[in-house]
Amino acid sequence: MKQYLLSVHGTHGEPLPEPEAIQQMFADVEKVNEEIRSAGAWVFAGGLTDPSDATVVRVEAGRALTTDGPYAETKEQLGGFWIIKAENLDEALAWAEKATVACGAPVEVRPFQDEPEA
Amino acid sequence: MTDPDGVARVYRQEYGRCVATLVRVLRDIDLAEEAVQDAFATALERWPATGLPPNPGAWITTTARNRAIDRLRREAARDDKQAQAALLHQPDEPQEVGPVRDDQLRLIFTCCHPALAPAAQVALTLRLLGGLETPEIARAFLVPEATMAQRIVRAKRKIKDAGIPYRIPTEAELPRRLPPVLAVLYLVFNEGYAASSGPGLVRADLCAAAVRLTRELAGLMPDEPEVAGLLGLLLLTESRRPARTGPDGALVLLPDQDRSRWDRALVAEGQAIVRACLRRGRPGPYQLQAAIAAVHSDAPRAADTDWAQVLALYDQLLAVTPTAVVALNRAVAVAELHGPAAGLAEMDRLDLPGYHLFHAARADLLVRLGRTGEARAAYGRALELATNPAERDFLTGRLDRLGPGTGPAAPAR
């Protein structure tokens, strides 16, 4: 089994959908979550708050430096993600398709590196 | 028959099949390729003395498998985890492993997986299934060899790291998974048929590879009419190749071709495929294009062409593939059936400013309408956009035939 990151990429600054639409989206996402769990593919998932809530920590000259985020000044920002287990990319893409339909935003699929053998 | 040329012929024919089987056995594309290349190196040493074995493909596959397993054993002894893992799947006794048809299908669908960029799909397909060397593929697509090598390495790494599976898509997945495969084969053929740059008009090796792979795919998927349609289209197009260039290498268009130079065997095969497709009654874009090519190949002279039939087929094609390029070709048929003014009216509704053939087709109709100044400008625009030297020569010839004019001059390029 491999693990994949399914990340949701939203466009920052776009007006929020109507509250009913957001409720519907939450319900749809929860349905997908249930499916992922019952298929035994679930590892973890979560939605993130606004990118402007982000804080960046980096080391400069041996000292930790904390600044207001987000790290990348781009319009497209990570809005949430799933980590799933799948036999192969086709399985992961099938989950990604359900995920993008549910959350209404593009989903990027990235494989995790294989875990080092014990 | 067992000279190095004989081995080279077997290589072209069997390489893809052998690699496909070895990928299944070893679960690793690089290992599979190395093993098959090792086996061919051995064949090159042995076959000149022993003669070709009765089934060269099975010989190569078995030799490659046994060598790969020997090597995995040696590496496993040195505590190589990956080699140990690969060995886990191998039975102990060496066995005859002939190429398996499903293996090739698996490899085609892996190479043309939609998670890979189209350029990478093309490169991998030609490399792994077509048995073309990386420098050959680089030359065909006019990119530096290092660029092509990197493209192939990256694609193979993505297959491994991202876990692109080695499997045949299910019936339900086919409508999405087959089109990229057909697109790759079509693109390889087209690049061979009208090389976008480089000296000659045609790169026969790419056309041959595309026809060979499509023929194999049609054999592997006999129930898919669009695969048959693509094969019919490629064969009928390929049949015209001998007539498509003059003695000096200049481009000769369909209406002006010496039809006695068409390859009759290819025409007959292509037409038979089109008839079989029609009987099935499940038309798709490739079958319709093949049917149009078949109508052209039915006409002994250009003047005998059944343009009403061509136009009816373009109407159908436009319905399933509503693109401006299809509409342009349809407009050409309209011009033949209802006159140049009607064709021009159709063309002028299209938005294809960057397509050299749009301007060339418009120019042809303007010439026929006696609107020479506008024709000259349109040929000039086509020349600015065309990259293939033979096509450029052709357009320059057309422009020269109009004589000097007061309209915009052709760009000095």
Image (spheres, rainbow, N blue to C red):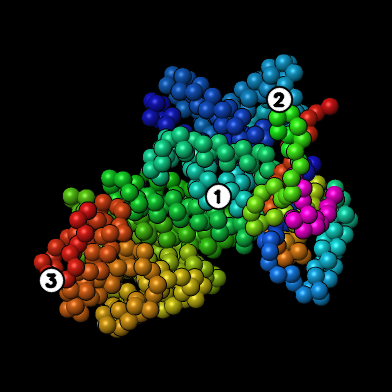
| Mark 1 residue element | loop
Say which chain tag 3 marks.
Answer: B
First to last magenta residue range:
A44-56
**Neighbourhood count class around disc 3 (C-alpha, 10 Å): few under 14, some 14–19, many 20 upward:** few
Say which chain tag 1 marks.
Answer: B
Say which chain tag 2 marks.
Answer: B
Residue contact at pointers 2 and 1, CB within 8 angstroms: no
Q: Which mark is residue B117?
A: 1
First reached walking from the N terminus: tag 3 or tag 2: 2
- Answer whether residue A53 is magenta in the image: yes
Which three-letter amino acid code belongs to the residue tagged 3? Thr
First reached walking from the N terminus: tag 2 or tag 1: 2
The residue at the point 43 percent across, 35 percent down is B145
Q: Which mark is residue B406?
A: 3
Q: Nearer the viewer, residue A18 or B117?
A: A18
Residue B170, percent from left and from top: 69, 56
